[in-house]
Image (cartoon, grey):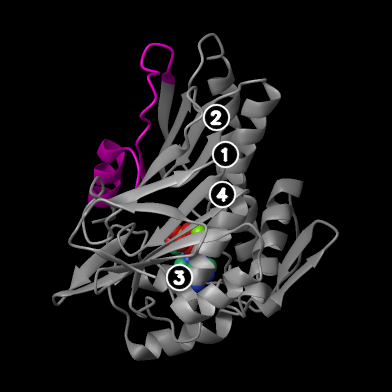
Amino acid sequence: MAYKNFLRAFFAISGLIICVLASCAKTESSRIELALGTVCSITLFEQGQESVYDEIFSRIREIESLMSVNIPSSDVSRINAAAGIEPVQVDKDTFKVIAHAIYFAELSGGALDPTVGPLVALWGINSPAPHVPTQEEINSVLPLVNWRNVELYNQSVYLTRRGMALDLGAIAKGYAADEAARIIREAGINRARIDLGGNIILIGQKKDRSPWRVGIQNPEESHGAITGILQIPEQSVVTSGIYERFFEENGKRYHHIFLPSNGYPVDNGLTSVTIITENSIDADALSTSVFVLGYERGRLLLESIPQTEAVFIFSDRSIRTTPGAMFILTDKSFSVKR
Ligand code: AMP
Ligand code: MG
């Protein structure tokens, strides 16, 4: 199922479909590669700067080689293997991303918890054979999920209990997208689009100075169907939703974002949350945090963070947005509530 989803994602390019309506066809170039377990697509809207693609993709692969749980030599795998045994010295990128994840874990009251690794493994959500665990199995891993048991010191990371495991899936793509944006800006490129499996950053302005337009995925459909279009300036847009990774068992659908307090996929009436803000790492952390917190608490959290907008989609097909989000509904089977 995961592989099927992945292929679907590949052919549809990403969970969020960008509708670039500028007349850029002749000067535009793109490169698409598989990395970070997803489809990574970079588009430059000017000619003559294609050499930057190599630099961007090698940086993305470097981040993957540090933070992937599927690479045994990665920093994250080494930290997990040493859980309850000893602290592990890590690269400064890894340390930075883990520290950022812990910051958002605290800010969200543990809704985002980078120690969900044992739950992700138990459900097998990223494996070829995901399944619903027994309540006993869930009860046995829940005590291992607790961001307060991560000790950060001097570029070393220690998980204090044996069996604990980090999973940076909720935040690492955002960091990689920010790094891609930094490389693009440092190369003096004025207009570009980064899409790392739905973690999107738009750089610069369209030629006609109209806002960028980003399609928001219909969470009930496979990749490619949108509910509406977001108009945004130079910013990042990241969505967390039930459609990104899921499986079905006995007619029920189980997705990939877990409630750390009970160990089950979040079931709070939301089907997706999209965050629009400056940095992709923040947008990525917040989309997961707010999805887990649910509408009321998620919105309260967002009110405490300046210059951050959101679109919430619910299972009853209603949509709510924060006041500054410029969202245009296109699928009239949904309705926007203020
Ligand atoms: P995202 O798509 O950014 O919302 O991230 C979802 C991914 O983060 C999942 O595939 C898991 O690897 C991981 N994850 C699931 N639930 C949580 C959670 N409550 N806190 C942090 N990471 C999570
Ligand atoms: Mg996220």
Judging depth in this view, the residue of 248 and 81 nearest the camera is: 248
Give the residue number, with chain letter if any, for mark 3: 291
Q: Is mark 4 within 8 Å of ligand 2?
A: yes
Q: Is residue 83 left or right of residue 17?
A: right
x 51%, y 15%: residue: 46
Residue type at the position of mark 1: Glu
Q: Most extreme residue toward the right, as rendered?
A: 154
Judging depth in this view, the residue of 291 and 121 nearest the camera is: 291
x 26%, y 48%: residue: 223
Residue type at the position of mark 4: Gly
Segment tinted magenta in the rendering: 3-29
Residue 28 on image: x %, y %: 42, 17
Judging depth in this view, the residue of 272 and 119 nearest the camera is: 272
Give the residue number, with chain letter if any, for mark 2: 205
Marks 2 and 3, the one that precedes in the sequence? 2
Q: CA distance from mark 2 to mark 3?
A: 30 Å
Label 2 Cα crowd, 10 Å radius (few <14 / some 14-19 / many 20+)? some
Residue 188 on image: x %, y %: 67, 20
Q: Is mark 3 within 8 Å of ligand 1?
A: yes
Give the residue number, with chain letter if any, for mark 4: 174
Q: CA distance from mark 1 to mark 3?
A: 24 Å
Q: Secondary structure at mark 1?
A: loop
Residue 47 at least partly seen: yes
Give the residue number, with chain letter if any, for mark 1: 234
Marks 3 and 4, the one that precedes in the sequence? 4
Marks 2 and 4, the one that precedes in the sequence? 4
Seen in the picture, residue 211 relative to 317 is either above or below; the reply is above
Label 1 Cα crowd, 10 Å radius (few <14 / some 14-19 / many 20+)? some
Q: Return the mark for residue 158.
A: none
Q: Are marks 2 and 4 in contact (CB under 8 Å)?
A: no
In the picture, which quadrant includes the C terminus?
bottom left
